[in-house]
Amino acid sequence: MKKILLLCMAFMGLMCTVDAQVAKIQRGFNAERQTKVEGVRQFEATKVSPIQISAGDKAARNGQWDDYAMDPKVLTVNNPFYGMYYYDLMSFLSMNQINDVAEQVSYATHYSQDLTARFAGNAIKKISLIVPDGAVYVKVWIKDNLESSTSLWETEADVDLPSDMKLQDGTEVGANYTVDCDYVITGDKDLFVGYTVECSWLTSTNNFFFTYPMTNYGVLVNFAPQGSDYAGWWDFTQYFGAVTIECYTEGNNGLQQLDIAMNYAEPTRGKSGEGVSFPVQFTNMGAYPLSNITLQYELNGETREVSIPVTDENGDESCLTYLEAASFIVQDVAPATPGRYPIVITPKALNAGTDTWEADNKIGNLIISLDTPYARKAVMEQITGTWCGWCPRGHVAMELLKEKYPNDFIGITVHWQDNFQTDTYSDIYNMIGAAPYALFNRFYSGDPFFGESGEGFDAENYVQAINAIPAEAKIGVCSTVSADGASVELGSHTTFSLSDNNGSYSVAYVILEDGISGAQQNYYSGQNMSGQPKELQELASLGSPYRTTFDAIARGIYNCWGIEGSLPNNIANGQTYTHKITVAMPAAISKTANCSVVALLIDNYSGEIVNAAKAKLNEATTGLNTVANGTLATEISAAAGAINVVAAQGTATVYTTDGKLVAKAQVNGAATIAVAKGAYIVRVENGNDVVVKKVVL
């Protein structure tokens, strides 16, 4: 794995530093801006070792960068410098206990609209691919919708091709196949270029060919007959990179010589005047390799420039070739005045030239400067379903995280396409369209157990990373069920350590229920688990389906992206803001005693969950005693077995110090609330004005 050595110098008389060694990650085009492709399911499989046909020459990079330039007229997501690989589809499916294969198998790769726009107006004149040895029929096609029965363009033929793709031992594995084409690229849509193949011995072999780096939806396969449980398109990208297909175009457009796509930059938070850091990732979309990249951004009126020379693991000069992505860490200092500071990062120079494709060379980011950093809770929203045989690992992860991080983790189970589904979460599960999957504070995403690695319980790393990020606010939650049980009042109080006048925050609430019995499908049942993490071993002994108890089921969220107006547009440093809303009690709830409420503080800019709190239904978080005094004229005292509240008008609520509701009374001038000896939190509110005080009898 090559590394990029980074040097960041801030001009205007300022200096900042950049992490000196950050690995270049082999992730393809628009690595973090992936869009969902309708009708495509993620394939869960045993990992394999692809067979290499040609080695490529990326290891021989020696400063002769012209040797690594792409043909700018070729539309492809293949990088020839990674070599060529193949694998037998039949062996791959059999290894995963799938034998239901159609006579004809289709393969495709995805070209996003961001890429096709670079070729707008060009005509595809030839399409080149590699078909399996023994192919007797091939249809080559272009679509803008995989599920459509019609193509934008297609051609088909019976074939008898000589095998010209051979291994070193002479084994024939495939044949090059090129067809003429006349499709004109409009540049305003995604394209799928693929082929359908039938082999003379399909029951024994069906080789497909691919290269790297991995791209979004690079290897799409439709292998099962209609009516099969496996019918439809499957994404094999995580195992095989990108299908070997090249589209040779003619026209005035194509790849630019020097061009990067800014993929993402992560917002960062830190105490005012102290160091902050944030990752930035970009992809080389140009035909020419990059040996030096200079980025720039402006912070608080001062310009920073970041110079990034590309080196290999030995520190020698190297290059970033087509579709290779680079990630690096920028370090800076949070401004002295607490607040939110938006920045825009752009390329200033690529090698000795400039980026000539401006459509995607800007990325926004945010540096948040905090007066008092608050501890941050990690929230996992796990997408699951009782029908999903791989989802038991997500349930295992949830229990492990609850046990290991009892005070720093909140788990939310979002059921999808089963009897526990709530439509109020549809924005989330429809956006993701896969299970098992998880969002961690809507900042990180990945498998609820494996994270990104696929090797062990690495989702825990997300929780640790989120807990390590300071928050600009703390939040508490409370709730009160109506006397008839038909509705529930949800409330929150949020204290900020910065000022903001842009309406940047809102609150959402989630009602959860524990202790629900049900049946869960389990693909681990009866499997040999010797290669699986120890935490999952027990799943093999369970049946499929097996009876289990589901906890933290989301019965309703109000609403997914935060309630508009739940926090004011103008936020003042050190102030506390309250909110409450009354909602209908979700009809699906079986037992309110098993329910709890979670308050989520949402960043409206990034969509992430800044902080969260959880309490049992009809109770409150102990954080109530941190609420600062409001402006409501109130006197609260305790004597002779009672709490006395004096206020013109309002509602007084008494809690134990661990958040349990003790009593509630209306105050019209004065109220006396009888309580036993002990310590209590008294909350008096009138509209948005709240006073909270701790008293001891």
Image: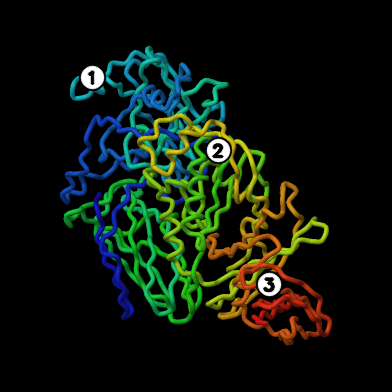
Q: Amino acid at mark 1?
A: Thr
Percent x, y for residue 67? 20, 44
> Mark 2, residues whose alpha carbon is within 10 Å: few (<14), some, or many (≥20)?
few
Residue, x 79% and y 81% (percent of image)? 672
* Circle 2: element type: loop
Of the pair 110 and 630, the residue shown nearer to us: 630
Q: CA distance from mark 3 to mark 2?
A: 49 Å
Residue 231 visible at all:
yes
What distance separates the C-alpha of mark 1 from that of mark 3?
Answer: 77 Å
Q: Which residue is mark 2?
A: 38
* Identity of the residue drawn at 54% across and 64% down: 605
Counting residues from the N terminus, which is met first, the one under dot 1 or under dot 2? 2
User: Where in the figure is residue 160, as x and y percent of width and height?
Assistant: 34, 13
Q: Name the quarter where the C terminus is drawn.
A: bottom right
Q: Nearer the viewer, residue 66 or 101?
A: 101
Q: Quadrant of residue 661?
A: bottom right
Can residue 248 be seen here? no
Q: Which residue is mark 1?
A: 171
Q: Nearer the viewer, residue 273 or 304?
A: 273
Residue type for callout 2: Glu
Q: Residue at x 77, y 77 (%)?
A: 674
**Which numbered mark, 1 or 3, is in the foreground of this view?**
3
684 left or right of 577 in image? right
- Whether 252 is drawn above or below 487: the answer is above
Q: Residues within 10 Å of mark 3 (few under 14, many from 20)?
A: many
User: Residue 655 bears which disc, if any?
Assistant: 3
- Where residue 462 sits: x, y (%)? 44, 56
Instruction: Name the spot of residue 2 as percent of width and height, x first.
Output: 24, 51
Amino acid type at circle 3 is: Tyr
Which structural element holds mark 3? strand
Which of disc 3 and disc 1 is earlier in sequence? 1
Displayed quadrant of residue 237? top left
